């Protein structure tokens, strides 16, 4: 059935009931679920949706993290800070609240896992939507005359969209901060520059613990990864704008963002700096460059006092998470290909086993439909 919402009405009632039961089961203080189930059913029948209580929203957002099969960092799921901004529907107030989110989450480098939840989808109108993949991202400017893309090739789409909306563009460095592109309810998308304040956008210059000249190279990365293009789905209700963050694991930057050939593609340059012989792959120059780049990332974050996990520690924490959940009598699902770190996989304990892949709700989900709609593209 065609729908402009993320969830159909029939699915919504079932999902609502399932979530209310889970919420009561895991929070015995909530008491007998039956009165709440009856109230939700009635509200659904009358309005086609229902409003989560504060406690349901907090628990729902936390369990959605617990259910994120791709996330290795789930041990602390129950300490996620939830900022309830469900009353916000307009682009400018949402953009301001995103800056507040970053301020609260950055916390001088002692990063706090945080989510801000904006207005949900309702049967009358879709909720607001943030076009950026993350609150902090670097622009990618199209390649010109045989020259490579300047910046992060992953973000060329958003960069073009922002330019089309009238963003004048940044200074043209490899690390230009993109503006937020926010679409309020019943509104066109609009762009908003983030405050250039390290309390909001904290960045770490990348240098190597021993290598010379890395400072002048000008590599940097942002301290807080805050995903902003996934719907938070709780009990059949969809919150399309619900940016959330944790802290980085070093390999996300050192083994992917700065290393992937379709991202910053820096391994050849790192190898040159290290004086490695790049003539043959069999010299393992890529592997050696990868290790040094990752040492540089961890060293730089430490030096700036910004929280960052290394993959050995985070893998051990994930094993602790599996054990903790087992003791609570809950199954943990996971996606092996995402959980195993992108370097030195078999040196971490998460490599040496398999995982159940069942998807559970509440969840953070990519809803391409919501994004096509946001961009005014025809729904397929
Ligand atoms: N891998 C993404 C990036 O490099 C961030 C994904 C979320 N990561 C996290 N540690 N919470 O920007």
Image (cartoon, helix red, strand yellow):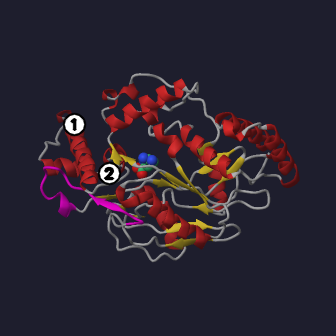
Q: Which of the 4 image quadrants contains residue 224?
A: bottom left
Q: Say if residue 3 shows up in the picture.
A: yes
Residues drawn in magenta: 199-217
Taking depth in this image into account, of 203 and 58 the one nearest to the observer is 58
Q: Earlier in the sequence, mark 2 or mark 1?
A: 2
Secondary structure at badge 1 equals helix
Residue 212 drawn in magenta: yes
Question: Is residue 14 depicted above or below 180 in this figure?
Answer: above
Q: Position of residue 330 (x, y in %)?
A: 58, 27
Residue 243 in the image: above or below residue 345: below
Residue 342 shows up from this direction: no
Tell me the distance, in whole angstroms, between the alpha carbons under discs 2 and 1: 19 Å
Label 2 Cα neighbours within 10 Å, binned few <14 / some 14-19 / many ≥20: many
Which residue is rendered at x = 40% and y = 28% of the image? 350
- Mark 2 lies on residue: 258
User: In the rendered structure, does residue 85 fall within the stretch colored magenta?
Assistant: no
Q: Nearer the viewer, mark 2 or mark 1?
A: 2
Mark 2 vs 1: CB contact within 8 A: no
Q: Which residue is mark 1?
A: 281
Q: Position of residue 203 (x, y in %)?
A: 33, 61
Q: Nearer the viewer, residue 287 or 38?
A: 38
Relative horizontal placement of residue 196, taking residue 158 as reference (left or right) = left
């Amino acid at each position: 059935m065609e729908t402009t919402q993320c969830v159909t009405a029939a699915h919504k009632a079932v999902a609502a009931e399932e979530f209310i039961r889970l919420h009561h089961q895991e929070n015995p203080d909530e008491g007998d679920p039956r009165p709440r189930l009856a109230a939700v059913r009635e509200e659904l029948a009358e309005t086609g949706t229902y409003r989560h209580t504060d406690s349901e929203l907090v628990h729902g957002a936390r369990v959605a993290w617990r259910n994120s099969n791709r996330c290795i960092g789930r041990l602390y799921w129950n300490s996620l800070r939830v900022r309830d901004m469900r009353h916000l529907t307009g682009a400018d107030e949402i953009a301001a609240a995103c800056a507040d989110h970053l301020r609260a989450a950055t916390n001088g480098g002692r990063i706090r896992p945080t989510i801000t939840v904006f207005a949900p989808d309702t049967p009358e109108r879709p909720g607001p939507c943030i076009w950026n993949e993350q609150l902090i991202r670097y622009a990618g400017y199209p390649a010109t005359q045989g020259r490579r893309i300047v910046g992060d090739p992953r973000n060329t789409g958003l960069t073009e969209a922002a330019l089309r909306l009238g963003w004048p563009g940044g200074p043209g460095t490899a690390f230009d901060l993109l503006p937020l592109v926010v679409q309020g309810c019943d509104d066109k998308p609009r762009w908003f520059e983030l405050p250039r304040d390290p309390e909001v956008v904290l960045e770490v210059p990348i240098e190597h613990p021993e290598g010379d000249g890395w400072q002048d190279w000008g590599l940097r990365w942002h301290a807080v990864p805050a995903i902003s293009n996934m719907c938070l789905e709780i009990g059949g209700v969809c919150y399309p704008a619900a940016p959330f963050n944790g802290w980085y694991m070093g390999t996300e930057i050192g083994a992917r963002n700065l290393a992937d050939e379709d991202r910053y593609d820096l391994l050849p340059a790192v190898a040159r700096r290290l004086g490695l012989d790049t003539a043959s792959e069999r010299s393992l120059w890529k592997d050696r460059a990868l290790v040094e780049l990752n040492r540089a990332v961890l060293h730089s974050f430490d030096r700036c006092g910004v929280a960052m996990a290394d993959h050995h520690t985070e893998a051990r924490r994930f094993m602790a998470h599996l054990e903790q959940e087992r003791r609570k009598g809950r199954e943990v699902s996971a996606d092996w290909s995402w959980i195993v770190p992108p370097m030195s996989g078999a040196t971490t304990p998460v490599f040496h086993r398999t995982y159940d892949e069942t998807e559970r709700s509440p969840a953070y989900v990519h809803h391409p439909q919501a994004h096509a709609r946001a961009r005014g593209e025809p729904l397929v």
